[in-house]
Image (spheres, rainbow, N blue to C red):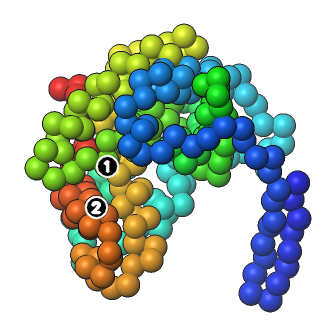
Amino acid sequence: MTEAILLSEGSFTCTVFEKACGRRVEYPECLQDNTLYERLGRLTGKLHALSKSYQPQERNGTRHDWSQNWFLQNIDLIPKSQVGVRTSCSSLIKTICSLPKDGRVYGLIHGDINVGNFRVDDYGEITLFDFDEAQYSWFVEDIAIQLYYLVYVYGGKDGKGLREEQARRFMNHFMEGYTLEHSLDEYWIKQIPLFLKLRELIVYIGAFRNWDGDETFSSSDNPWFKDWIAESKVRIENDIPIVNIWG
């Protein structure tokens, strides 16, 4: 249910949704829930299997391609002084564009599966919502996005080891569920680090939407965020994925 509202300062669309059943699985609970990972894997696999046969009913209803992601299109949110980040962005997009693309591995994906975008009921059933970032991309990007949000919370001196431990556990349980509904060649699983770098770049660009001119965000009262933004910048500039357990 939608209604368009036109005002002098712009147009808005009001929407009404049925509330999803269940509860949100918050941090840090979501970092230890192996059963959740398996169910997310099965849900994601089913979505990708269905995506292969999906055809939009209207041509003007087609979602955009991954490269048209709003944040990638607004790279200028990042200060011009961050030449290294901008250079890495261009290089990463060029590399991803060179990947093979066909209907077995590429199609409509959710584009933003994370703990804020689903609810789990008392029976463990997951209701996925918030399809605002649905786009055409490689199916493996949907996997990398989920992994990213389960490892980016670990930073500092012990961060690398904790991220690797979390990544292995997530992938083991996630793929148990995923392969029940859909299959991806090992080649694509090994491309996850590429898409982890893409997600980090998108999240990094998003951090500058409310930028006040201080590239270190020293005015922020969130120490985790300040540590993350600093570490993220280094990873992006040096073309390093946040975690790589694939060699």
Instruction: Name the side, left or right, on which 34 lies relative to 66.
Output: left
Q: Quadrant of the C terminus?
A: top left
Is residue 186 visible in the rendered image? The answer is yes
Q: Position of residue 69 (x, y in %)?
A: 53, 55
Is there CB contact under 8 Å for labels 1 and 2?
yes
In this rendered view, identify the residue nearer to me: 137 or 1.
Answer: 1
Amino acid type assigned to the residue bearing label 2 in the image = Trp
Amino acid type assigned to the residue bearing label 1 in the image = Val
- The residue labelled by disc 2 is 224
Q: Residue at x 25, y 72 (%)?
A: 82
Is residue 134 visible in the rendered image? The answer is no
In this rendered view, identify the residue nearer to me: 94 or 170.
Answer: 170
Q: Give the distance between the C-alpha atoms of the residues marked 1 and 2, in whole angstroms.
A: 8 Å
Q: Residue at x 65, y 48 (%)?
A: 130
Instruction: Name the side, left or right, on which 74 lies relative to 157.
Output: right
Label 2: few (<14), some (14–19) or many (≥20) C-alpha neighbours in 10 Å: few
Quarter holding residue 170: top left
Q: Position of residue 120 (x, y in %)?
A: 61, 34
- The residue labelled by disc 1 is 153
Q: Mark 1: which secondary structure?
A: loop
In the depicted structure, whether residue 181 falls above or below residue 244 = above
In the depicted structure, whether residue 227 falls above or below residue 219 = above
Q: Position of residue 143 (x, y in %)?
A: 45, 32
Q: Position of residue 3 (x, y in %)?
A: 88, 65
